[in-house]
């Protein structure tokens, strides 16, 4: 497998429209090669709400990759597409690293605007797996966390993540899975050789910074 070049990534998940704290991490955002957003930019908002978040981040860094979360209305992905930042349901290769993305979540206790069943999620991930270039290191950006990890351990004491996301990771072994959705699941974990990162909710001041050198990731969870 080829190794990607050095890359620095700031990860902001579950922003839920809260952008007032971004100046506190201005230097990290400006120094990042990419800002990765694993979903829930808004709190049940549409294009206008998503655009407000993206423009706030673009004040510090214009190189953004995003997937929609379950609290982002489906039309947000159309906006991401127009803005040139959409990673949902597709792959993109950057500096020798393959990024794959999946948005939405499994059904929640209370209905949210952007949900998928487990079979629907599996079909989307199977399509991503078929797009894989196994000669390149891979990063998965999935709003829904993999099942039975620290990232999907919810407030009710149950693991609520997706078996399909876990199966994709076990099959494809990305170097990293950036995820979110479960705010209390902010953590670093592993599945095989894959590092699982749930930075927690930026709305609560949590984020992550990943440095990748030669395909080897070094990841830190941070709080403002």
Image (tube, rainbow, N blue to C red):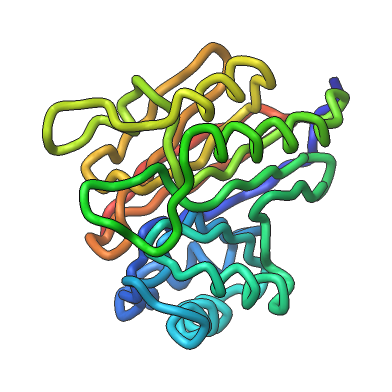
The x and y percentages for residue 126 are: 70, 30
Q: In the figure, 156 relative to 70: above or below?
A: above
In this view of the protein, which residue sits in the foreground, 129 or 208?
129
The x and y percentages for residue 56 are: 48, 82
Q: Quadrant of residue 106?
A: top left
In this view of the protein, which residue sits in the foreground, 156 or 9?
156
User: Is 74 displayed left or right of 222 in the figure?
Assistant: right
The x and y percentages for residue 137 are: 75, 30
**Residue occupying the far left of the picture:** 156
The quadrant of the image that shows the C terminus is bottom left
Kindly identify the residue that appears in the image at 49 percent across and 17 percent down.
191
User: Is 10 displayed left or right of 139 in the figure?
Assistant: left
Kindly identify the residue that appears in the image at 58 percent across and 61 percent down.
66
The x and y percentages for residue 174 are: 65, 27
Q: In the figure, 126 relative to 41: above or below?
A: above
Q: In the figure, 136 relative to 66: above or below?
A: above
The quadrant of the image that shows the N terminus is top right
């Amino acid at each position: 497998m080829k190794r990607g070049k050095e890359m620095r990534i700031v990860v902001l998940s579950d922003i839920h429209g809260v952008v007032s704290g971004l100046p506190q991490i201005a230097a990290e955002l400006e120094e990042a090669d990419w800002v990765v957003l694993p979903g829930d930019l808004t709190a049940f908002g549409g294009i206008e709400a998503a655009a407000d978040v993206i423009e706030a981040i673009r004040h510090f860094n214009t190189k953004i990759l995003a997937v929609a979360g379950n609290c982002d209305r489906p039309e947000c992905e159309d906006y991401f597409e127009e803005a040139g930042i959409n990673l949902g349901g597709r792959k993109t290769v950057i500096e020798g690293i393959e990024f794959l993305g999946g948005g939405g979540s499994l059904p929640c206790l209370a209905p949210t605007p952007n949900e998928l069943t487990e079979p629907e999620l599996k079909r989307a991930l199977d399509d991503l797996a078929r797009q894989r270039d196994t000669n390149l290191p891979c990063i998965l950006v999935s709003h829904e966390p993999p099942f039975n990890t620290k990232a999907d351990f919810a407030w009710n004491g149950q693991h609520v993540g997706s078996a399909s996301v876990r199966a994709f990771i076990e099959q494809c072994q990305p170097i990293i899975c950036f995820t979110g959705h479960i705010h209390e699941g902010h953590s670093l974990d592993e599945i095989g050789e894959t590092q699982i990162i749930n930075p927690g909710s930026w709305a609560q001041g949590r984020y992550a910074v990943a440095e990748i050198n030669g395909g080897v990731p070094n990841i830190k969870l941070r709080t403002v």
